[in-house]
Image (cartoon, coloured by chain):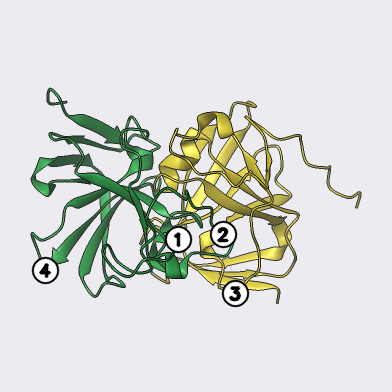
Chain colours: A yellow, B green
Amino acid sequence: MAYTGRCACGATQLEITAEPVAVRQCWCRQCQQIAAGGPTNNAIFPADAVRIEGALGHSQWRAASGNTLTFHFCPGCGTQVYGQSSARLHLKTVRLGMIDEPHGLRPEMIIWTDEAPAWACLDPQLEQWPQMPPAPPPPPAP
Amino acid sequence: MAEGGHAGRCLCGAVTYALAAEPLGARMCWCRDCQYIASGSATVNVLFPEAAFRCAGDIGTLRMTADSGNTVERGFCRQCGSQIYSRTTEPAGTQPIRIRAGTLDNPGLRAPDAYIWTDSAPAWAPFDPALPRYRRGPGSARKE
């Protein structure tokens, strides 16, 4: 198994059997709302490699792209577990705080820097996009 | 909203709050417990007198022993999980309430003045070199 994880209260458990497609940090306003003021840090995995135990709550927002972003969280502690775009159901975007350390994953790209507060500290070494990044490659043909 | 105060809400709007005071300070916390609820970031916390905080809506709470040894209560929206606040319940009345900056209507209201619990920050964590980094709680040894 590649990765394991849990939420802050332990009611939600996570197992991941693949390496991430990408790891990136998002400063969009909605992410700041669900991430206690900072950016979300997201490891994007093939959806079928992510197994979750425990009841999840979910909510949604409409992204600037027009896609619906559904995000799932532990109802016992509010920890965000993963998000998913209606345009990319083959991927699950797992919140980095959920994954047990040491995992060696780190953000490689920062997106939606236009919406970061003036005090935000962004790693200048990382690729940055003012809003959405380019679309990820399509899933492999079956 | 009270005149001169501040307001905020969770992402979905099921929880709203008002703060009838100005911030006492702000800081980012890299304790591991905060990284869980901050999607792998530090929480960004704006400090207010607890008596100035009024909250309405479907709020869930979780009590836990923080790395400091204090008992803290974390409040979050039960409909979307957005973290709203952390307050110290034991010892009570000793600490300002910590409002999660992402839920303030103006998340830029108060720039953080310090980092705390940097000993548990991930290797990739970016730090503003102008701000003090406390290895543990506020006032603990600094990392230079």
Closer mark to the observer between disc 3 and disc 2: 3
Q: Which residue is mark 3?
A: A102
Residue shown at 56% from the left, 44% from the top: A122
Q: Is residue B140 left or right of residue A75?
A: left
Which residue is outermost to the right? A141
Mark 3 in CB contact with mark 2 (< 8 angstroms) = no
Residue B94, disc: none
The relative height of residue A86 versus residue B74 in the rendered view (above or below) is above
Measure the alpha-carbon separation of dots 3 and 1.
14 Å
Disc 2 sits on a residue from what chain? Answer: A
Q: Are marks 3 and 1 on the same chain?
A: no
- Identify the amino acid type marked 4: Pro
Residue shown at 36% from the left, 66% from the top: B142
Measure the alpha-carbon separation of dots 2 and 1.
8 Å
Q: Secondary structure at mark 4?
A: loop
Q: Which residue is mark 2?
A: A96
The relative height of residue B139 versus residue B97 in the rendered view (above or below) is below
Measure the alpha-carbon separation of dots 1 and 4.
23 Å
Which residue is outermost to the front? B144
- Identify the amino acid type marked 1: Gln
Disc 1 sits on a residue from what chain? Answer: B
Disc 3 sits on a residue from what chain? Answer: A
Q: Secondary structure at mark 1?
A: helix
Q: Are marks 3 and 4 on the same chain?
A: no
Q: Which residue is mark 1?
A: B35
Residue B91, disc: 4
Q: Are marks 3 and 2 on the same chain?
A: yes
Front-lying residue, A75 or A2: A2
Disc 4 sits on a residue from what chain? Answer: B
